[in-house]
């Protein structure tokens, strides 16, 4: 009986071949869908969503303004605070669109409300989490929702300066997530957005659709109806001179600047005139200049 000889051992790969295989493996790994890793929500109260890696990164210190320093927006402040408080308690609450004049504290209010509610919460309750998603990552909002849907915390998903251009269709993803999707918005999630546009679309785009369509009403309904997904529309309008000066002197007192009131008033008004606007942002920029001239750190 004859026996076949065992096959020869494989010849070792050359260094060039090994390098080639490694490059192929690296390329396949980059092409594979990223693994979603749950965030450590105990590490911070605020996070930023990174769409490229489908991950959340903690924000150790949020850039925010104290609630007491937000002047001239008392009504919208109270409405948003009450809505967020109900949500934090597990009660029904609405998505909110904060729209209107630039620099009047829209994004500052969202961050201030989040911080105040966590400060005043019952010690037995889990802290409310704030997640910022960038405008260009709105298409990945369903992925973010699925990541946090089963977490015991409650989340504010926040998009600053949200708007859409005429050739942009990502607004459809937002519409589906807010109300229309088969799963709907998770009970532990609420969506807050700020925008300079009430309908999130440029006015000329809506007017153009209306003027060229066979049925003008139906042509713009899909686009305009996006803002209807927000139960709260909170308008921010340009402030008066008195409100602007109130903001300036509130900052002066908060920082502890020692200044001449009449001189500061005149300088603050001149500062606003040269910039063509009175707003909370303008007041803060003036205060930064004033503090620097007085050698005072902020």
Image (tube, rainbow, N blue to C red):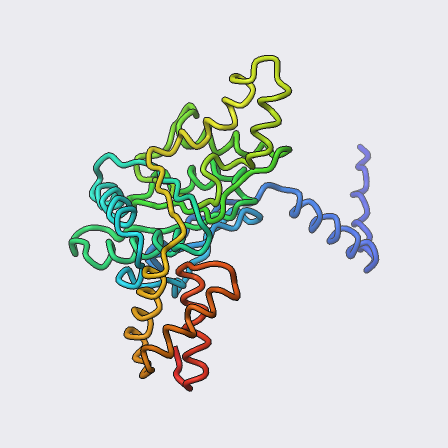
**Nearest the camera: 94 or 145?**
94
Q: Is residue 50 left or right of residue 298?
A: right
Determine the residue located farthest toward the bottom in the rendered image: 295
Give the answer, above or below, for where 94 lies relative to 9: above
**Nearest the camera: 131 or 263?**
263
Residue 115 image position (x, y, % from top left): 29, 58
- Name the quarter where the N terminus is drawn: top right
**Nearest the camera: 132 or 288?**
288
Q: Residue at x 33, y 82 (%)?
A: 260
Give the answer, above or below, for where 270 lies relative to 130: below
Residue 4 image position (x, y, % from top left): 81, 37
The image quarter in which residue 28 lies: top right
Q: Residue at x 54, y 44 (%)?
A: 137
Q: Residue at x 54, y 46 (%)?
A: 51
- Name the quarter where the C terminus is drawn: bottom left
Give the answer, above or below, for where 111 lies relative to 143: below
Residue 7 image position (x, y, % from top left): 80, 43
Q: Residue at x 31, y 71 (%)?
A: 249
**Nearest the camera: 259 or 93?**
259
Residue 244 image position (x, y, % from top left): 36, 62
Q: How many marks?
A: 0
């Amino acid at each position: 009986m004859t026996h076949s000889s065992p096959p020869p051992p494989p010849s070792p790969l050359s260094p060039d071949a090994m390098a080639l295989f490694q490059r192929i493996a690296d390329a396949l790994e980059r092409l594979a869908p990223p693994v979603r890793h749950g965030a450590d929500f105990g590490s911070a109260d605020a996070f930023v969503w990174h769409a490229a890696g489908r991950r959340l990164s903690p924000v150790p210190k949020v850039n925010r303004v104290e609630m007491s320093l937000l002047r001239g927006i008392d009504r919208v402040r109270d409405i948003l605070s009450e809505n967020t408080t109900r949500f934090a308690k597990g009660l029904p609450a609405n998505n909110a669109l904060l729209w209107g004049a630039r620099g009047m504290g829209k994004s500052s209010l969202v961050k201030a409300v989040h911080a105040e509610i966590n400060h005043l919460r019952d010690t037995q309750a889990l802290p409310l989490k704030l997640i910022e998603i960038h405008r260009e990552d709105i298409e990945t909002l369903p992925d973010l929702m699925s990541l946090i849907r089963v977490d015991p915390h409650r989340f504010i998903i926040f998009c600053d300066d949200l708007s859409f251009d005429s050739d942009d269709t990502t607004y459809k993803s937002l519409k589906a997530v807010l109300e229309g999707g088969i799963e709907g918005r998770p009970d532990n999630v609420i969506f807050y957005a700020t925008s300079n546009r009430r309908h999130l679309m440029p006015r000329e785009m809506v007017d153009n659709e209306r003027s060229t369509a066979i049925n003008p009403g139906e042509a713009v309904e899909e686009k305009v109806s996006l803002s209807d997904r927000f139960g709260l529309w909170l308008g921010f309008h340009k402030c008066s001179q008195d409100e602007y000066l109130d903001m300036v002197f509130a900052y002066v007192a908060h920082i502890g600047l020692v200044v001449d009131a009449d001189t500061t008033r005149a300088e603050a008004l001149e500062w606003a005139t040269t910039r063509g606007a009175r707003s909370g942002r303008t007041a803060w920029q003036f205060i930064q200049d004033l503090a620097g001239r007085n050698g005072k750190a902020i």
